[in-house]
Image (cartoon, rainbow, N blue to C red):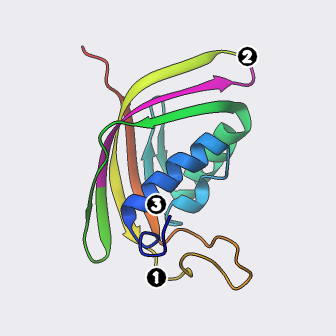
Amino acid sequence: MSDGDADRAEAVVRDYYDALRSGDPLEPYFLEDESTVKFGISEALFGFESVREALEEQTATTADWTVESGHLVVSERDAFATFADEVTMAWTDTENGANRRFETRWSGTLVRDGSSEQDTDAAGAEAEPSWRFATMHVSTADEL
């Protein structure tokens, strides 16, 4: 990501996809607040602590992620951004070996995080994202 892109909400969404693929921690992408909400395919999580716990468990019990963005749309405002995407995602459940694959729809809101440094810290390591997910909704796109 170029320096000019690092402060864009779209770059943070794409970085989240990369972190998911790589098995990297996902909780740094979420707003540390009781108002944070994440709806997954089979879960409803309210508050940062619930989101954090679920993401840590997901990272520990899944592997071999594929995340293919099909139509990412991001609208950025001063202090918030909205996003929507059609995502094909697949992974392996490391507890039972089952392979999962879903055609999904993602949407949500990001808020600008003014408390963290952008891009890299003094040691040159990647800093926390400049935008955080306040809400995220992931659902299957199966027809009824």
Residue type at the position of mark 1? Gly
Distance of mark 3 from mark 2, alpha carbons? 31 Å
Q: What element carries label 1?
A: loop
Tell me the crowding category of disc 2: few under 14, some 14 to 19, or many 20 or more residues within 10 angstroms, Cα based.
few
Q: Which of 110 and 70 is in front in this view?
A: 70
- Quadrant where the C terminus sits is top left
The residue pinned by badge 1 equals 114
8 to 41, vertically: above or below? below
Q: Earlier in the sequence, mark 1 or mark 2?
A: 2
Q: Nearer the viewer, mark 3 or mark 2?
A: 3
Q: Which of 81 and 74 is in front in this view?
A: 74
Residue 59 sits in which quadrant? top right
Tell me the number on the disc at residue 96: 2
Q: Which of marks 3 and 1 is nearer the N terminus?
A: 3
The stretch of residues the image draws in magenta is 83-96
Residue type at the position of mark 2? Asn
Residue type at the position of mark 3? Val
Q: What residue is drawn where x is 70% and y is 78%? A: 124
Q: What residue is drawn where x is 32% and y is 76%? A: 79
Q: What residue is drawn where x is 48% and y is 62%? A: 34
Q: What residue is drawn where x is 70% and y is 73%? A: 125
Tell me the crowding category of disc 3: few under 14, some 14 to 19, or many 20 or more residues within 10 angstroms, Cα based.
many
Distance of mark 1 from mark 2, alpha carbons? 41 Å
Instruction: Describe residue 55's horizontal placement relative to residue 132 as left or right.
Output: right
Instruction: Describe residue 102's horizontal placement relative to residue 63 as left or right.
Output: left
52 to 110, vertically: above or below? above
Dominant secondary structure of the residues highlighted in magenta in the image: strand
User: Is 17 within the magenta?
Assistant: no
The residue pinned by badge 3 equals 12
Instruction: Describe residue 120's horizontal placement relative to residue 76 as left or right.
Output: right
